[in-house]
Amino acid sequence: MRFSWPSPRHLFLAPLALIMAAPLIWMAITSIETPDQARQFPPVLIPHGIDWHNYTRAVDSAPFGAWYMNSIIVSLVVVVSNLVLCSLAAYAFARVRFFGSNVLFIALLATLMVPFQVILIPTFLIVRHMGLIDNVAALIFPNLVNAFGIFMLRQFFRTLPIELEEAARIDGCSRVGVLTKIVLPLSVPALSTLALIMLLWTWNDFLWPLVAINTEKHMTLQVGLSTFQGQHQTQWTVLMAGNVLALLPLVVAFLLTQRSFVRSIAASGVKG
Amino acid sequence: MRFLRSDHVTGWLLVLPATLVLLVFGLIPIGWSAVLSFQHNDLLSPPHWVGAANYQALRHDPVFRKSIHNTVVYTVLFVPISIAAALGVAVALNTRIRGISVYRTAVFVPVAVSTVATAIIFNWVFDPTYGIANWLLNELGISSQGFFQDPDQALYSIVAMTVWGWIGFDVIIYLAALQGIPQELLEAAAIDGAGRWATFRSVVLPLLSPATLFLVVWSTINALQLFDEIYNTTRGGPLQSTTVVVYYLWQQAFQFFQAGYGAAIAEVLLVAILVVTLLQFLVSRRAVHYTS
């Protein structure tokens, strides 16, 4: 056995990891401190005992449950709808020759060139015209399809062996049958990547829900959290408890599925 | 009847739902935004045409100028700092030493934290009286700072906060690219007598250039669209030192109800993003190397 020195990389990586983790750790610590402990300088880094009151006060003072439900409903519908509608369109663009397909494909991709901030005002006017302002549906309809999903799935579908699909067609299988029975089962990695990206985008979206929703109980978690901050300014312990409640699901999901999470992000290269 | 079963009909039926959604919530708003920018629209009374008045007013609006200045300063700092830091961190993380998964997790976790949650955390971290940032500075012998509450520091504090929030994403992209570099190339460079630094400069860096291009374009677009982190920390203050373009757009449209004026800001932003992206791709044609 030869003794080996620890890698010198630790000297860089350990402080770096500490700096990256410190804001989150301090949030967690503050959330279990008493208000008096949080109002000390130098700060109390190791609290004596755990005070859960901040969490009960946060839940009592704001409809976190409703915010969770709204975020879950919106995210779920948007993810499923993107998987279905993007698959249908992407398959047509990948395999079906139809009149105008190239022009249409480019027109749809053009929507990716224009960031949402630019079309925020007309989108608001359209959704208001539909009578959906301050309704959770306002957060769903504009996001039912994303051109990015169509593009990504089309690229993936084109890498699949076409012989399988042709054989099925000759055996009398319909286009939709080929899509659901052959193409989609082979596309699980691409579909799960798309699902994860849409989930991150929708769950963390802020500007549009801020503009489209006014009533507290119709808010999503992000907008709710923002108003929660407005109502609890400088009540740091309660604020941090609310923040922990809000970010816990996604952080836990990330920690549990880190490998596939990271692979999906690397494959698509997108954070909302 | 044969026509009905043809690929033309099938194709259009398959793309129809997606096309309708993207038409109503993508293409129509793009055109409408341009139309709005030539109108007076207070979101309540019927709009009327004002020609180029919104654009002329923009030219003489000191807050708009300030917002452009702030956005440019933010972008010019955020993009190179976050990408260079991510490159260094990714290279350091691209190894199999004890505890590497802990280090990676610590760097990646902020990717799963929303912009709003990040902002709330940093309001507390940067609190001038009780925050740990000042505690750390004091420990290092530096006096306490005002951070978000100091007009001279607020924008730089926003840069620091967003680098924390975004670096994990950049590192993921770089790590994937680093792991895609064929080992033979690095061995060949070593056999040819190249040192570590020379190998990094002449072999690794060029092979990473597609990832770098992607990160530069993506980070720039996101930096030009900064909003969430401003809204949830400084609200454009103090003294408009963090009023960025999208924040000003939102203020004009949804606080002051000047939707036409807001749309004009949006059009300027769109042109700026398209021009900057195009320039980046043009420059990249000379600097980016793709492996076959």
Image (cartoon, coloured by chain):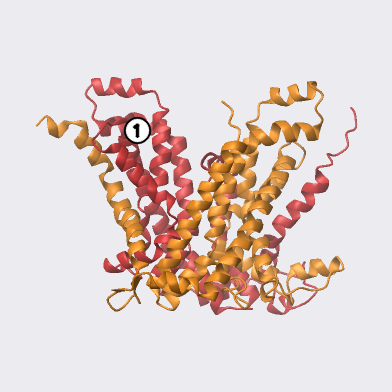
Chain colours: A red, B orange
User: Toward which corner of the image does residue B54 lie, by quadrant?
Assistant: bottom left
Say if B176 sits above or below A253 in the image. above
| Quadrant including the C terminus of chain B | top right
Element carrying mark 1: helix
Residue B272 located left or right of residue B201: left
Q: Residue at x 78, y 49 (%)?
A: A14
Of residues A69 and A88, the one nearer the viewer is A88
Q: Chain of mark 1?
A: A
Position of the N terminus of chain B, as image quadrant, is: top left
Q: Is residue B29 left or right of residue B171?
A: left
Binning the other alpha carbons within 10 Å of mark 1 as few (below 14), some (14 to 19) or many (20 upward) gives some
- Residue A150: % across, % down: 38, 42
Residue B105, compared with residue B10, is above or below; it is below
Horizontal and vertical percent position of residue A140:
36, 58
Residue on which disc 1 sits: A94
The residue at 60%/40% (across/down) is B211
For the residue pair A54 and A264, the one nearer the viewer reads as A264
State whether residue A44 is above or below residue A17.
below
Q: Is residue A223 left or right of residue B99?
A: left
- Between A55 and A236, the one lying in front of the other is A236
Say whether residue A167 is visible.
yes
Write the residue at 33% across / 51% down. Answer: B22
**Type of amino acid under label 1:** Ala
Asked whether the viewer can see residue A271, the reply is: no
